[in-house]
Image (cartoon, rainbow, N blue to C red):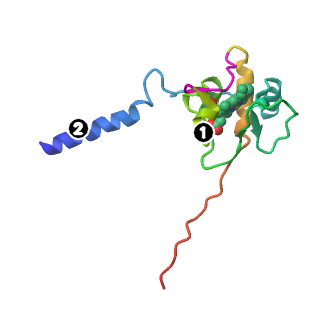
Amino acid sequence: MRHIIVTLIAGLCLIGVCGCDSGPKSSKGFSLPDGDAKTGEAVFVELKCHACHTVSGIELPEIEREQSIALGGQVARIKTYGELVTAIINPSHKLAKGYPPEEVAADGESKMENYNDAMTVTQLIDLVAFLQSRYELEPYQPTDYYMYP
Ligand code: HEC
C-alpha cells in the first residue's frame, strides 16, 4: 500500500514538473524564421533600446541613459529565441538576473518599455537574431581536484 502511495505521489510530481510544457499556453511548436542580425542592430538603435541597455562588443550611438542593463556577453547557458522574445514582449514574466528587483521593476512589473504596439514582427525577429548573436557560452571550467598522494 505504502509503495502504491509513493508511486502515486512520484507520478503526480512528474506531471507537475512536465505539465507546464504542454497545454494550450505552452511554447511547444514555437519557431521563429531566421532574422537578420545586422538589421536587428539598426532596429535596436531606432527603437532606442540603448537608452537602457548596453550590448557586449557593440559600440552604440550616444543617448541619454535611463538604465544600464547589459545584454549579451558570456553566459553559462545561451539564451534561446523563446527567452529573448519573451524578455521583449512580456518583460515582467521573468526579470533579468543579477539586479536588485527594485532597480529593474516597480510593483513586480519590469521597468522596460512596452513595444508591443510599436514594433513589427519583422523587427522583433531581427532584434532577437541580433541579441542572440551577442551571447557567448562561458568556457567550461573544470574543477581542480586535489589528488591525494
Ligand atoms: C526604459 C528602459 C528600457 C528600454 C527602453 C528597453 N529595456 Fe530592455 N530591459 C529593461 C529593464 C529594466 C530590464 C530588466 C528587467 C527585465 O528583465 O524585464 C530589461 C531587460 C531586457 C532583456 C532581458 C535581459 C536578461 O538578461 O534577461 C532583454 C532581452 C531586453 N531588455 C531587450 C530590450 C530591447 C530589444 C529593447 C528595445 C526594443 C529594450 N530592451 C528596451 C529596460 C529597458
State whether residue 29 is above or below residue 139: above
Does residue 123 appear left or right of residue 110 in this picture?
A: right
Does residue 101 appear left or right of residue 130 in this picture?
A: left
Q: How crowded is mark 1: few (under 14 residues within 10 Å), some or many (20 or more)?
A: few
Circle 1: residue type: Pro
Q: Which residue lies furthest to the bottom in this view?
A: 149
At a point 45% along the width and 31% down the height, the residue shown is 21
Circle 2: residue type: Leu
Residue 25 image point, x, y percent: 48, 22
Residue 17 image point, x, y percent: 39, 36
Taking the magenta stretch, the answer to whether it contains residue 84 is: no
At a point 63% along the width and 44% down the height, the residue shown is 78
The residue where tag 1 is placed is 100
At a point 78% along the width and 30% down the height, the residue shown is 51
Span colored in magenta: 107-116
Q: Dividing the picture into quarters, in which one does residue 8 lie? A: top left
Within 8 Å of ligand 1, the CB of disc 2?
no
Asked whether residue 109 is in view, the answer is yes
Q: How crowded is mark 2: few (under 14 residues within 10 Å), some or many (20 or more)?
A: few
Mark 1 secondary-structure assignment: loop
The residue where tag 2 is placed is 8
State whether residue 101 is above or below residue 124: below
Q: Are marks 1 and 2 in contact (CB under 8 Å)?
A: no
Residue 86 image point, x, y percent: 60, 28
Within 8 Å of ligand 1, the CB of disc 1?
no
Q: Ligand 1, what quadrant?
A: top right
Which part of the image, by quadrant, shows the N terminus?
top left
Label 1 and label 2: CA atoms lie apart by 40 Å
